[in-house]
Amino acid sequence: MWLALVVTGGIDPLNRIDIAMNTLTIIVFLPAMGALLCLIAPKPMIRSIAVLTSLVTFLFSLTLFSIYFGSDAGTSADVFGSTYGALHHVIRLPWITTDSINIEFFLGIDGLGFPLIILTTLVSFLSCWASWNMEKWKIGKGIRAYFILFLLLETGMLGVFVSLDFFLFYIFWELMLLPMYFLIGVWGGERREYAAIKFFLFTLAGSVLMLIALVAMFFYSGDAIAQAGGEVASAYQENVTLTHGTFDLIELATNETIQAYFSSPVTRFLSIKFAPLMFAFLFIGFAIKLPIVPFHTWLPDAHVQAPTPISMILAGVLLKMGGYGFLRLCYPIFPTGAEFWAFTLAVIGVVSIIYGALCAMAQSDFKKLVAYSSISHMGFVLLGIAVMTKAGFQGAMFQMIAHGISSPMCFFLVGVIYDRAHHREINRFGGLWMTMPKYGTMATIGFFASLGLPGMCGFIGEIWVLLGTFDAGSKYPWAYTLAIIAAFSVILTAGYILWLIRRVYLGKEKEEYAGFSDVSGREIMILAPMALLALVLGIFPMQTVFDFTNGTLDLVLAHVTNAISMIP
Amino acid sequence: MNSHTYEILLALGVLSPFISFWLLVFVGPKLGKPLAGWVGVILGMGVPLAMASYVLLGWWFGEDAASRAMLGEQAFRYHWANLGTVPILVGIKLDSLTIAMYFMVTFIAFWIFFFSVGYMSGHSDEVDGKSKYHRFFAYLSLFAFSMLGLVLSSNLLFLFIFWELVGLCSYLLIGFYFHERVPQYAQMKAFITNRVGDFGFIIGLMLVYFQLGTLDLDDAARIFAEQYAAGTGIFASTFTMFGWSLATIMGVGLFCGAMGKSAQFPLHVWLPDAMAGPTPVSALIHAATMVAAGVYLVARVFRLMTPEALMFVAAIGCITLTLMALIAMVQTDIKKCLAYSTLSQLGYMIFGLGCGAWIAALFHLITHAFFKAMMFLGSGQVIEGCHHEQDMRKMGGLIKKMPVTAITFLVGVLAISGFGIPGTNIGLGGFFSKDEILAVAWVRTFDWNDYSRHEAEHGEHHAASVPAIDSDDDASDNLNGNHKQMLLASDPQHGDSHAAPQHGEAHTASESPRGLKPSAHGDNAHGRAGIFSHVPPMPKWMFYLALFTAYITPFYMMRCWWMTFMGKPRDQHVHDHAHESFMMYFPLIILAVGTCFASYFLFRDLISDASTAATIAPMVLATDGHLHTAAIAAAHHWLITGVGGSFVVGFVIAILIYGRGLGIASAIKNTVGIQQIHTILDHKYYIDELYHLVWVKGCLCIAHIARFFDTWVVDMTYNTLAKLTERLAAFMGLIIDTHGVDGIYNGIAETAIGMGEAVRRPQTGRIRNYVLFAAGGATVVIVLMLLYWGVGSPEQVAMLTP
Amino acid sequence: MEHIGLTHYLIVSAVLFCCGIFTTATKRNAIGILIGVELMLNSTGINLVAFDRYMGPGRLDGQIVALFMIVLAAAETALAVGICINVYKNLSTVDVDSASQLRG
Amino acid sequence: MFRSRFHIIALASLGVVAFSAQALAGEVAGYSDVTHAAASGSWLEVGLFYIVAAAACISALGVCYSKNIVRMSVWLFGALGSVSLLYFMLAANFLAAIQLIVYAGGTLILLVFGVMLTSKSPWARFEPRKIEILGATVVSGTLFVCLSLLLTRADWATTDAVVAGTSMSDFGHSLLTTYLVPFELAGVLLMIVMVGAAHLARQDK
């Protein structure tokens, strides 16, 4: 694992062994090593190497399940204990250490990161495999660069989900941004440069705010500790005392001293209350990724221009980083900010739900429609988190996973037909179910899953969020109205999805498409897992997701509500 | 018997169609015709039917009421997931109603599957050789799975899940011929209309979850009653909308779902169009089972309904049953005619539940399921025979060609018209169920609260005869007592045994409707007994509309039958082609027999057994006729004797008009006044047009506005931001040449240019500009330092200095 | 008579710095820009030495850094002039605006 | 008119150079009144400071003001000289010497060579756009105002400990001990620069 060594250079050999042996490190850097391999491999072998790498990564990430099934403790609640910050596969080593700054190489997972890691590795593998036929694309050149960037992207994404040091988190965040920029900008459609630049600018704007928050949080935590006498015992590590600011996300969230300082109304930044401002900074950074109206306009362009596998990654994983960011940074660290913004956030969420659905209804471009539908779906995530109820949090988390399954499937379905027809005009399609029966069946599953049909993954998230929102009515009177408005989206969603199905798959066969071959074995193999998961998640939500997430989510929520109750 | 045996058997019965679904999906094409069909029949419905029959007999004859209740109590629950903190327990609602529905569904569905094996072989191959035969049975199996699951669910959430699944099956099956244009729209219409209902359903769910803190049917009802008694929870909130309390809104919300599924008035539009699907589908889903699911839902959540909510239910039902019956009078498409009669009958059921005639409504549901399924199969037989001719005006005289169909169809017509011999217990389904609904409706039009108060005032001297019914047990005993009496009024089975005293009382009561009140004198229940202290009386017009429709129904049914089977053949070609085949009319015969005996069969007992205090008492004591049993008995008796023969009138008129072909009918149609009415009815009150204008067009319009907004406002904002950066840059001497901005014509491209430029411009290699920018940035920072961070202030300096 | 303190020197360096910026920002002649840069470098030099003198007397750090500054400035100038000559050879002018082949 | 002013300025700067040369001589000789003056808060120090500072500022402004490249270099020469004087007054004699030798002796000459080599006529001017001048004026003006505000508001914890002028030996010592690595790096850099410059300026293409 010498690559790990490079990344964590400047530490003593023993720790290097630790790193090399650490599961998360391996998971995170396997793709990067695959990228190196692609760098030197002969051209014909590249794509197989890439696909194999992503497959191995996926399989290896499955070993994480041993956390739950290794012991008799079966659920997240049991595994991650009774305090937020009980982690697994932790590795923390000093990375950049001066007398005032201590940036650590700090990886670990809990119920928040775990399902997203599995999702990431799975979606990455599937989409990597989906790029198998990239020579046939309009821009079929640069296979080597493509797959290298792809694998680097995967490393970046995985890193975001496992790194618990804000600095490291930020680095991975940016690391993930660049390959995406090139993947869209080079292998994209007609207006790829525009889309790529737009994506880049939006995300960069977000990460700038995040950077400000990062620095501010570091120094203010330092002030907090200084005020407390310069010596504060760590909240969750034995015999560790903090003497200056920290980037440790868990510490920032759980340390009473820091929390008290952050949330006290006298703490100011640019003469604005600290917690709300920082929350807003982080929130915008993540909301752009989620994306949330009005920061969403990069998404349709990026999706439409990006090649199919990249759209899958984009929809399947990148959007989840926003939600993950909320749950990992915004809410635990700035609960008071959350309370301050709750109404705004919920309203934005509802607006995104309805607005995205309406926009999707009006699209004539197949891919754009799916893109807008993901805006609508991610609105549920925001809504569920914003109302801060158990059901809401659980629903939001589930919605992330569910959308991570269904929307890549939808995008791949679009890609399948795009490879054959070379256009995406919904109104020019028709009768494809007759032409390609297998494809039609798969498409029905995929789109009904994203429609939120009960018994499929989409439903659980939506209904959980809706009920959770309504449940918040006891705290926030406005929650009733919002829940009802959000519930209205079930009609809109059904509207545009069914209309889409009718226009594309039903009806008489058209001559121009009569010659289309049905989905190939590879495509079936890519679609099948997602279809299967869409069903299984819908039927056994507890065994597939809730058992792994709820414990941690409840801890986070308890932490947040507790902190809010402290507000005078 | 082992306490879980029934559940296991029922569960197996649900599982087997699920298995057959996947089997048919994967290996269906290889099975081919008709093998795939038989798989569907055996695995998809045969097994469930076997289970159902076994369970039914075991349940009814093997257990007594106590053990039945006990079994229902200790039914198995599986912890499916946690909704927030509320555990969602999935299990089987094991009571007589479940079993009755389960048996009805499996029985009818089995014969419809059987019918389809023959029918679909001629109807599934339109699409250039690609057979959809197996697909049809796969869908049917999936439907069977969902429908049975719906019936069994003990949990509102799961009820909702299966609810949606049957919706999906109906969607897939309506659009089975999706290569044609009509079914495509029909299926969309069906699904989306149902979704509109589900919107309400979800709101109801939210309120149940939030206010009652559970989604389990029984717990919810219990907590609801407790909360009413204590005036806490949902009854504590002062929130009102359209003058409805929160509790009422909850009930109405749940009912909205039923309005969608059971196609009640504002949402009825999808059902007639749904006839675009294959005929067996119309018979199974859109006549017998799925559309009845709405009624079933209302029956299940009956205990969560406030009187106001029930009043709303009744009103909707009443409107539906009248309007749809009127439309049915002018339909010429045989399936459409049946569809509208179905709507009308569903209206009757909903109306019955609204008045509180819980038993009667469900009883009507089951009898209706039998004869309507049969009639649809018959119509399918006819359509098949007249190769795909559905217009009744082209038919006629078919009785010679297809006698069995004609006879069975006639049985159905009689049943739906409430055929029976007044004063006796001989009659077909409607004769008992529909009339009882009317009876309850009639009784509910009086304000019994006055009477109750009156009773309460002079309650003392009744003390002996008035057991306090404030506690549930008493209520239940008392209620069972009332049940017995009530059943006598209409139930043939007990008729002989206890007829005398009961009828005697009824006679004394039935001299005049007004006389009803005193007749309830001996009745020992009164308003305070129910959980709802005040129950408003039902407006009279509802009763009269329902009664009026009772006269229309026989007319249009007989009209339909006569135009199809009697008279002279009007289209020789069709007539010559007509034929019938055993595979198809055998199920007809079975169902016809079922129709004849459904009302005498166990169903009535099962339902009344289900309607114990634990099921409906909290509500029904106050709103349903059970409180005023004797009165209802009297009213029912009076109705049966007085109005029971109403169907004759309808028949006579129908035969008079259509006996001699269509001449008279068209003559009437063209008379002034009638003509306009006819046009309106023919266009179904233009509701479809209205909806298309308001909802479809409106929604799309909004959607396009949203898209426009997205492109030209949201996106253009960023575009403009980019532009501003550009302008600023220009001002700072960044830009030598600015492209002309013409956002109106190509906004997107402009965005591209704007953002692209904004990024690219600074990269133009003018060092001095960089310097200027950097310096500007530095200046800003310093200004900030001066303004905000008070640099230079002593403490700051203290920080800076070593 | 008032006492000459650190601030005085800093002010002077500020003047130089601003002049340097102005020069760099307004001259189109490559060498002119270079001169501006030199000015700025000098102002930093003044800062370094002044701080060294007034805040850490006896320690040479400030002066040493200033020394390096001078050396690097010299190196930078040498290179820059070389580049200018090259540009001039190719474009026969040192107007930086005309050296725009690399513009995107 | 231009020319006359140019001569005056040139003379002034020459005077500055002479002064600094004398100071350097004195330093080398081992005694240094300049440093003494700088150390003691006498009128000499103050007056000297204001003169030198004024010289520095004036020549800097001259750089800004003058349009053509030759004058700019002359003004720059003045600025560099006065800066070296400031170094003297800051008791950084060696540095001042280096400043004079390397800058005035090396860099400036290099610049002038550059001017000569690259310009058809040394008096050629490229006018910037008015807007640029405006922007530059605004920015640098604001920057100056803010900076001086900042500097005046801050009271630095300064020490007025009188220190003797540092000698070369101290420099050499710390260069070869504490700052060895940067020192070596600088050496390497210089070599690279030499090669690079040579390559860049090579005649044959």
Image (spheres, rainbow, N blue to C red):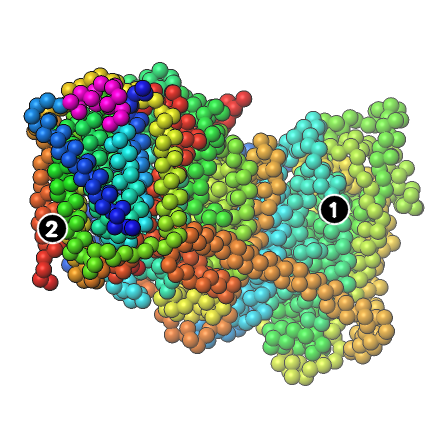
Q: CA distance from mark 1 to mark 2?
A: 92 Å
Q: Which residues are magenta?
A: D33-48
Residue for badge 1: B312
Q: Please state which of the two labelled residues, at mark 1 or mark 2, is closer to the viewer.
A: 2
Residue at (46% x, 73% y) in the render: A509
- Tell me which corner region of the image, top left, top right, bottom left or bottom right, holds residue C70: top left
Tag 2: Cα neighbours inside 10 Å, few (<14), some, or many (≥20)?
A: some
For the stretch drawn in magenta, the main secondary structure is: helix
Tell me if B51 is positioned left or right of B471 in this view.
left
Mark 2 residue element: helix
- As shown in the figure, which amino acid type bears the numbered disc 1? Phe
Residue C57 seen from this side: no
Q: Is residue B657 above or below residue D16?
A: below
* Vertical order, A390 against A244 (above or below): below
Residue wearing tag 2: D196
Res. B289 mark: none
Which amino acid lies under the numbered mark 2 shown in the image of this protein? Gly
